[in-house]
Amino acid sequence: MSFHPILRKLRRFRAARRKADGVGQAIILAAGCGSRLKGAIGNRPKCLADIDGETLLDQQLRLLEAAGREIFVVVGYQDDAVRQHVGSRATLVHNPAWDRTNSLYSLWLCRDHVEKQTIVLNCDVLAHPAIYHAVLEVSPNVFAYDSTSGGDPEHMKVEFKNDLLSSMSKTLPGDRTHGENVGLLNFDPHTMQLLFQEASTLIETSGSSMWVAAAVERVASRVPIRGIDIAGLPWIEIDFADDLGRARVDIWPKIRDANRDKAESDLVTAVPQKRHSVRRR
């Protein structure tokens, strides 16, 4: 499927960004095997899971290409298959320890490649193009979150103080949770270097099995990081077979139909900033 209205808007944004800041970068974290999805995707890596005849990775690459980003994909499990699928669309960074590390280590492997404003995302996130645009069109040091989610133990929860990120953790108590991290952030070069510094410290002191969120939380104590609430826009993180089924049956049709039925001005709109309120249970 094609997001022609989205692509036109993002291309105009890309031209303006190039003129002002130069081409930005993007990192897709795709080293894992997606073991919890094996019954639904066979032996394929999670990033090559099929959604309506196209892989999750294809959809992410297309939107990032349209935004003019230089793309890096961190691979590990079945890296040859991913390499063949990606072709010349991105530079691949290999995580040789993919089976015993987590997303923080994969991100850290990109430390020598990043020199510009960078968007970081997980390969298992299917999101409406307007979510990408909401994160890309504002000043950097932002991330997308959903204020209507965050009640499940698997959710990466977030807390804000004075409208700035203060905590990001799966174990955040419900009375402090303001929503769920979508898994899509956009940082300026200085903040990316701080992120790599914190990643190095965490890997050295706590091992390589931590999430990127642990480093983001530490960076938030050094640099103001804002959340963009995308509540109401379709998105899903695909961890289990049920998630993949919902992505195919519920989330993707909403993205596809919105692109078909709505005007460009309706599709690509800055997501309004909302006040952070603690989720009530």
Image: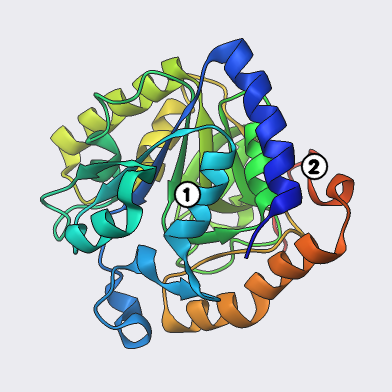
Place of residue 221 in the rendered image (x, y in percent of width and height, measured from the top left): 47, 24
Q: Nearer the viewer, residue 38 or 178?
A: 38
Of callouts 1 and 2, the N-terminal one: 1
List the residue tagged with mark 1. 61
At 11% from the left and 52% from the top, the residue drawn is 97
- Residue 112 position within the rendered picture, expressed as x and y whole percent measured from the top left: 24, 24
Label 2 sits on residue? 274
Nearer-the-camera pick, 250 or 165 = 250
Relative to 5, 224 lies left or right: left
Rounded to the nearest angstrom, the CA distance separating label 1 from label 2 is 29 Å
Residue 101: x percent and y percent?
18, 52
Amino acid carrying mark 1 in the image:
Leu
Q: Is the residue marked by circle 2 packed among few (<14), some (14-19), or many (20+) residues within 10 Å?
A: few
Query: Closer to the observer: label 1 or label 2?
Result: 1
Q: Is residue 3 visible?
A: yes
In which quadrant will I find the N terminus? Answer: bottom right
- The answer to whether marks 1 and 2 mark residues whose Cβ atoms lie closer than 8 Å is no
**How many C-alpha atoms fall within 10 Å of the one at disc 1: few (<14), some, or many (≥20)?**
many
Q: Is residue 114 above or below residue 43?
A: above
